[in-house]
Image (spheres, helix red, strand yellow):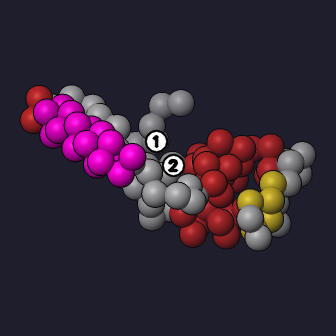
Amino acid sequence: MEEFRAAREAVLQAERNLAAAKGEEYAVPVEFPVCWDYSVLENFWPAIDLGDLVVTVGDTEISDKNLAELHAKFSGQEGFTAHLYYRSFKEPTYAFQEKLPTL
């Protein structure tokens, strides 16, 4: 069984290398545990902000009380944009220097 896993990983790595060489997208393994609070903040912040939803992820409770703090915590992570939309929602007159991605 171990030989099979090693061979399968070698094939997957070869496929990734080929896709990278061709400039194509490819999947990479994700280390677990996945940061579920990141996903909750990215996708459910409007309902949380309105007080309609409280989410518990592991030991962390995400509510309207700590939403701004958690957005600030994740704001430096690549690909995380929820903090920008949250800020534009909370401060509609704020002049963003960066272009917000289109939803």
- Which residue is located at x 72 percent, y 44 percent? 44
Residue visible at 48% across and 31% down in the picture: 102
The image quadrant of residue 78 is: bottom left
Question: Distance between the Cα atoms at labels 1 and 2?
Answer: 8 Å
Residue 95 placement, left or right of 16: right
Residue that appears at 17% across and 38% down: 14
| Residue at the disc numbered 1 | 100
- Residue at x 76% of width, y 70% of height: 59
Q: Where is residue 49 in the image (x, y as percent from the top left)?
A: 79, 52
Q: What residue type is labelled 2?
A: Thr
Task: Kindly report which numbered mark, 1 or 2, lies closer to the viewer in this rendering.
Answer: 2
Identify the image quadrant of residue 73. bottom right
Q: Do the residues labelled 1 and 2 touch (CB within 8 Å)?
A: yes
Q: Nearer the viewer, residue 39 or 102?
A: 39
Report the label total: 2
Residue type, label 1: Leu
Q: Is residue 98 visible?
A: no
Taking 42 as reference, is 70 above or below it?
A: below
Q: Is mark 1 on a helix, strand or loop?
A: loop
Span of residues in magenta: 1-20
Magenta span dominant secondary structure: helix
Q: Where is residue 69 in the image (x, y as percent from the top left)?
A: 67, 70
* Residue 2 belongs to magenta span: yes
The label on residue 12 is none
Q: Where is residue 43 in the image (x, y as percent from the top left)?
A: 65, 42
Res. 72 visible in picture: yes
102 vs 91, left or right, is left
From what the image shows, is residue 53 above or below residue 21? below
Q: Are there few (<14), some (14-19), or many (20+) residues within 10 Å of tag 1?
A: few
The residue where tag 2 is placed is 81
Q: Left or right: 26 with respect to 53?
A: left
- Residue 76 located within the stretch drawn in magenta: no
